[in-house]
Amino acid sequence: MTNNFIESEERRELRKAVRDFTKSFGPEYFLACAREGRKTDELWAGAAKNGYVGVNIPEEYGGGGGNLGDLAAVLEEMAAAGAPLLMLVVSPAIVGTIITEFGTDEQKQRWLPGIADGSARYAFAITESDAGSNSHKIVTTAYRTEDGGWRLTGNKIYISGVDEATHILVVARTEDAKTGNLQPALFMVPTDSAGLVRNEIEMGLTLPEKQFTLFFDDLQLPYDALVGSEDAAIAQLFAGLIPERIMGASMALGSARLAVEKAVAYAKERKVFKDTPIGAHQAIAHPLAEIHMEIEAARLMTQKAAALLAEGDHMGAGEAANFAKYLAGEVSVKAVDQAVQTHGGNGLTLEYGLVDMVTSSRLGRIAPVSREMVLNFVSQFSLGLPKSY
């Protein structure tokens, strides 16, 4: 929790510990894993052992008993140290939050301890090729079977980390709610299920986590694969989407901080005219100063969103999370671009570790929700303007 815009001493200590731990791996490790097709298993295992992966999971299930703000701080510091774990967004933040809030006691006992100790990673599948940003057009459907279970059919696209996950939390419709506004039913699907086909998507992102297209071909599920209630409607889904936006903002903020850190270090040492570092020139210094302020503003909004969520103000947290995600995504792109410009030609070499950040920083403007859809949200719900779509 925050107090007068200052994080608690415990949160600040958590940040420092995570940053120090992640630096022992560093961006070199992270990029080597991405380029060689290896997983960041050592980093994940170490983070889990230290309690970082399950920091937001209730203590009775082996977690740290913290809130999403603590997990967001973990991801921001890992990103700032050059080794962000995308699966933190999906497994403990989205899936962990939904199961904690809506799962049965048996489901919590079954799935939360694996998140807490890092032994299990879960993916999340909502996006479909024909739905895009309009989740109401989701057509993946769950049909009831004679034995009381479920039969799942449909497809998903851009699903992260399926090859690392033991289960996927799939957003679907039930057969009696195939039209109209989405009333999501969420199912935990084992990744080794018969009837599940996954195809890797070739991406231009230098990340260890892969993206997949999924096909569900009459995939059979037991009755208790359904998480929560069939009629929990959109509130159950939003329980995961708000944390997703907060975590997305945190990941973008960490990357922005890393880019500025690299640019400042270079600007202090690089000399071109006489004996004056280029950082003394306002053409270099002022853009970096401006970005530094924008990062701090976006961090405050991210912390506000997490604090509102911890207090149970889901409406306020939803609005703040959209603000945070937009601001962080924008400043991340701006920070990386300015860092490259500060380095000149060196910014496009592999040696300085910025060129891979150019493509990955764009992710924050697209996912988990596009900047345009955030602006639509703010126009309609924050300002009360007419809906245009």
Image: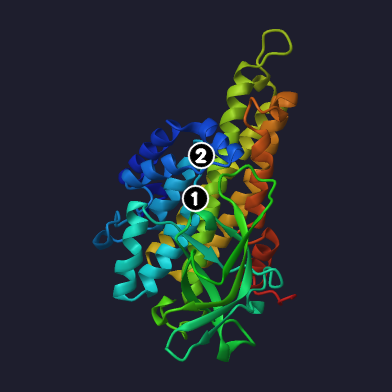
Depicted 135 relative to depicted 304: above or below = below
Are the residues at dot 2 and dot 1 in contact (C-beta closer than 8 Å)? no
- The type of residue carrying mark 1 is Leu
- Mark 1 residue crowding within 10 angstroms, few (<14) / some (14–19) / many (20+): some
- At x 67%, y 60%, the residue is 370
In this rendering, does residue 246 appear at all? Answer: yes
- The type of residue carrying mark 2 is Ala
Give the left or right position of residue 135, taking residue 273 as reference: left
Q: Which residue is mark 1?
A: 300
Q: Secondary structure at mark 1?
A: helix
Q: Which residue is mark 2?
A: 83
> Which mark is first along the chain, 1 or 2?
2
- Quadrant housing residue 312: bottom left
- At x 37%, y 57%, the residue is 115
Which residue appears farthest toward the front when viewing the image? 194
The color scheme shown is rainbow
- Quadrant housing residue 226: bottom left
Mark-to-mark CA distance, 2 and 1: 22 Å
Position of residue 28 measured from the top left corner of the image (x, y, whole percent): 54, 30
**Considering depth in this image, is 59 or 373 the residue closer to the camera?**
59
**Considering depth in this image, is 150 or 265 the residue closer to the camera?**
150
Depicted 318 relative to depicted 348: above or below = below
Q: Secondary structure at mark 2?
A: loop
